[in-house]
Amino acid sequence: MLWNIQVTVNGKKYTHAVEPRLLLVHYLREVLGLTGTHVGCDTSQCGACTVILNGKAVKSCAVLAVQADGGTVLTIEGLAQGDTFHPVQQGFWEEHGLQCGFCTPGMIMAAYALLQHNPHPSEAEIRHALEGNLCRCTGYHNIVRAVQWAARRLAEARTG
Amino acid sequence: MVITKLVGARVKRKEDPRLITGRGTYTDDVRLTGTVYMAVLRSPYAHARIRKIDVSKALSQPGVLAILTGEEVKQMVRAPIPALAPLPGMKMAQRFPLAVGKVTHVGEGVVAVVAETRYQARDALDLIEVEYEPLPAAVDPEKAMEKGAPLIHEHLGTNLAYSAKGSAGDVEEAFRRAAGTVKARWVEQRLIPMAMETRAVVAHYEAGPGALTVWNTTQNPHVLRSALAGMLGLPENRVRVIAPDVGGGFGSKIDVYPEEVLAALFSMRLGRPVQWAEERTENFAATIHGRGQVQEVEAAYDKDGVVLGLRVRIWADLGAYCQLFTHVIPTLTPTMLNGPYRIPNLAWELYGVYTNKTPTDAYRGAGRPEATYLLERTIDLVAYRLGMDPAEVRRRNFIPKDAFPYKTAVGTVYDSGDYEGALNKALALADYQRLRREQQERLRRGEGKVLGIGLSTYVEICGFAPNMPENATLRVEPGGTVTLFTGTSPHGQGDATAFAQIVAEVLGVPLEDITVVHGDTLAIPQGLGTLGSRSMAVGGTAVYQAAQRVREKAITLAAHLLKVPPDKVTCAGGSFFVEDIPDRRLSWKEVAEKAYNPPPGLPPDFEPGLVATVYFKPPNFTFPFGAHVAVVEVDRETGDVRLVNFYGVDDCGHRINPTLVEGQIHGGIAQGVAQALYEEVIYDESGQLLTNNLMNYAVPTTTMLPPFTLEASVTPTPVNPLGAKGVGESGTIGATPAVVNAVADALRHLGVDPAEVQMAATPERVWRLIRKAEGRRR
C-alpha cells in the first residue's frame, strides 16, 4: 500500500508514491539521491540526519516521509547559494569545525536553525542547541568556534 | 628540514568544500545501476550450537535473491578472515565470514540475505528460522582461564590464547629495599569506537574482465585488497579497493570484516553490485571493541618517591576470535611500561584470553593508553602515600632531557623528549598552585562540590614502524599541475591538505594546483593506510622525498633548457631561473611540457617524464609526549562529576599544520575523557551486550565536554627529515588518566582510597565510594 506525497526539497517540488514506513532520511537519500544527509544511528541519538522541515530542525530518521507531505525541506545541499557558502558552512571551514565530515551536514543544519532564532548565542547556548548532534572527531571545541564565527559574520551582514 | 611559510602554516583544508556542502561520497552514498542490498542475521546468544537453519520462508519473499549460511560460505572461501601471524606458542582462533557450527558472541553473523531493496533485505531477516542450543558463556577473562570454564574453541582445548612475560633489572631486590609499596587492581573497560559513519561496503564483480571492485569504509585499502584476493581466489591485480570519504575509524576500520567478503561473494554469484550499510545497533556488536584489560600493579618506591620497581599482570580480553590485530594490541602495553620514567626494575605478565564477546582490536591508542593509565595512576598513589605533590614525584622519576636517544629498561629506544619541560609548561598553563589553593578553600568552606586536580605525563610509541614503509608518487602533469598519490588513507585527519603543503613548499607550486589522491588501490602502489599515527611521520616523509626527487629532476632539465649548470638554477616561487639573470625564467608548465616532449639536444641519459615514487622505511618508531592537567568538580551528595577544565601540553615534534594537530588533540582528549567518565561496554554474566546502542552508551555530547586549553611543545624527532612524530592518539593516551586522577584526587579528600576509583567514574561509582568512606568514618 503506497501513499502519494508531494514534498518541496531545496526549492524543488517532488511527487512520489512511498511506503508509509519509509523514513524521511531514506526518502531524501534513496529516492531523491540527496546523499548529503547521513544516517549515523538507529535510535535518533546522533543527529547526523538533521534537516529543516517546515522551518524547524528535525532528525529525519525519526520522521516518516509521509509526515513531510505538503511540506518544505531544506537539506545541506540547499544551503549554499551557487558557489557562495552560507556563513555557517564558511565558519566550519574557517575554524576547522570538521574532520571526517560525517556529522557535519547535520551539525551545520542544527547550527543554522540555532542562529535563525538566536543570532547571538553564548557558548553555553551553542552547546545546548547542538546537544543532539554527536561528533566523534573534533571534541566540539572548533565546532563551537565555527558557530561563533558564523554568528559574527551574519551579524556583520545584517549591519553592514 | 626548515619549517617556513606553508609548512607550519594554518592552512584551511582542501577536503572541506565538498564536505560542508554534502557533496562528499561516503561508501553508502555510492550509487551503481542494478545494485541489490545485503542484510545479516546475527546471533542473539553469546555461546550456542547452531542446530538448524531454515531460510525457506525468507527465500520465497518478493525481492529476495539469495541467502547464504556459514557452512556454505566456508566452502566458498580459501581462508578464514585474516589475522596477523600468531605470537609464539599461541592458540589461534580465526573466524569465517559467517558462524559455522556454533556462535561465539552476541552479534556474530549467522545468515546473510540479498534482496532488491534495503527494506526487503531487512524484512527477510525476520523470516529466517535458526534453532540454537544455548551453551554456558565464558565472559570474564580471568574466569575464562580457569579449569572448567566453558570452552569457546573446543579444538584449542583452552581459552588462553597466549601468555607472555618479561622483566628488566632485579624486581625482587627493588621490593626488598623499598621504603614502601603500593598495590592496585584496575579495569581498562571495553569501549565502542563509535565512528560516526558505521561500516559499509559496495562490492561489484564484473564477470567479463573477471574483476572485483569494492568500495569500503576501510582505513587500509591495500590490506583489504590482499585479503579479498586471497580469500576469493582472485589475483590482486584484478581486485580494486576504494576507500572513498570515510567517516572516522579510530582503529575500528582497520580489520577485514566478514561483510566485505560476503558482499563480494554475493556479487560474484548474482552478477550485480551488492551494497550493505551497518546499522548502529549492529555496529555495537559486529564491529570491534577497544581496550579490555584487567591490570594488577605493584610498585616499590624509596623515601624520596623514586619508583624502584614495578610488577604488572595484565589479562587482555580478546573476545571470541582474533581479527587482524586482536592478539597483537595487548603486546604493545609492555613496550611502554616505563612511560616517561627511569624505573630500572620491572616484571610483567600478560595473558591473552578468549571470551564470548565481540573481538577487541585497535582503538585510538591501541595498547598504549593502557600502559600510561597504569603508570599515571600508580605514580599518584606513590605521591599520596608519601604526602608529596604528584607533580614533584613525577619530576623525581623522569628520564632527563639530555638522555636521548634513550633505551628504557623494557628495551624501547625513545627518540627525543623533554618530559619535565612539558609538565612544567602544563602546570603553568593550568595555574596549578592557584588550583590547589582553590581546592583547599572549598574544602575549608565545606562546599558540596569538591575540586579534583589530576595530572598525566605521557609518552607514547607511534609512527609505526621500522618494518612498515609508506610510499608517495608525485606526478607533475604536462600542463604544470601536480598530482600526489599517497599510500596513506586519511579519514578525517586532513593529510591531503598537510601533504599538499609539503609539496607546495618543496616545489614552489600553488596549493590549488596540487591534487592529492588516496584510498584507491588501482592508482597507488601498495600502502599501509592510516593507523598508528604514522601518516605524517612515515607517509609525509615519503611525500617530502618524492617532491625533492621531482624538484631535482626538474632543476636538471631546467638547467639544460637555460643552458647553465644545475647548481646555477634557482627553483622558487613557481619558476626556474638563474640567480643573476632573473628575467630568463621558466615556469613549471614549461619545464613539465619539455619533460614529456623532450627537445633535441638533451643528454642521451635523460629519461623523459616528471614522476617519482618513493618508499620511506622509518628507522624507528617515534615518541610523542606531553602533560595534561584535568580539573573536575565532584558533587559529594550525588557523585556527579563535571569536567570543568582541561589543559594540555603536547609535543609531536614539528607541526606541519598546527590547526590539524590541535584538531587531533581535541578529538583525542574527548575520547580519553569519555573513557574516564562516560563510556563503558557492559556485558551480563550470560554474555548479553547490555550497552547495545546509543540509548545506553554515553558518547559525549557538546555539554559533556569543556573547551580545551592547549599549548604546543616542539621537540623534533631525528627519526625522519620532517621532525614530525605523529599526534593522532596522544590526546586519548594522556587524557584518560589525567581525568581519573582528578576524580581520585577529589575523592581522597573525602576519605576514599584513591586506588579504588575505577573507570568509568560514573556518578553511581563515585557516590558508592563516598558513601563507603563515610560508613568507615562513622
Image (spheres, rainbow, N blue to C red):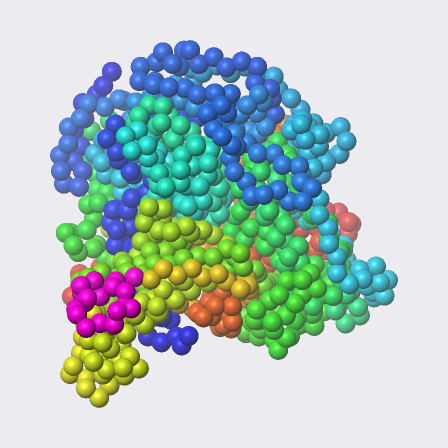
Please indicate whether residue B404 sits to the left or right of residue B23 in the image.
Answer: right
Residue B671 in view: yes
- Which secondary structure is most common in the magenta stretch? loop
Q: Where is the N terminus of chain B found, in terms of image quarters?
A: bottom left
Horizontal and vertical percent for residue B517?
A: 31, 53
Horizontal and vertical percent for residue B744?
A: 65, 56
Please indicate whether residue A144 sits to the left or right of residue B508 in the image.
Answer: right
Please indicate whether residue B584 sits to the left or right of residue B4 in the image.
Answer: left
Residue at coordinates 52% horizontally, 29% vertically from top-left?
A: B96
Q: Which residues are magenta?
A: B593-611
Residue at coordinates 50% horizontally, 62% vertically from top-left?
A: B618
Residue at coordinates 21% horizontally, 42% vertically from top-left?
A: A74
Residue at coordinates 63% horizontally, 36% vertically from top-left?
A: B92
Give the residue at the far right of this rendering: B176
Horizontal and vertical percent for residue A49?
A: 32, 40
Residue B600 within the magenta-colored segment of the rendering? yes
In the depicted view, which residue is nearer to us: B154 or A39? B154
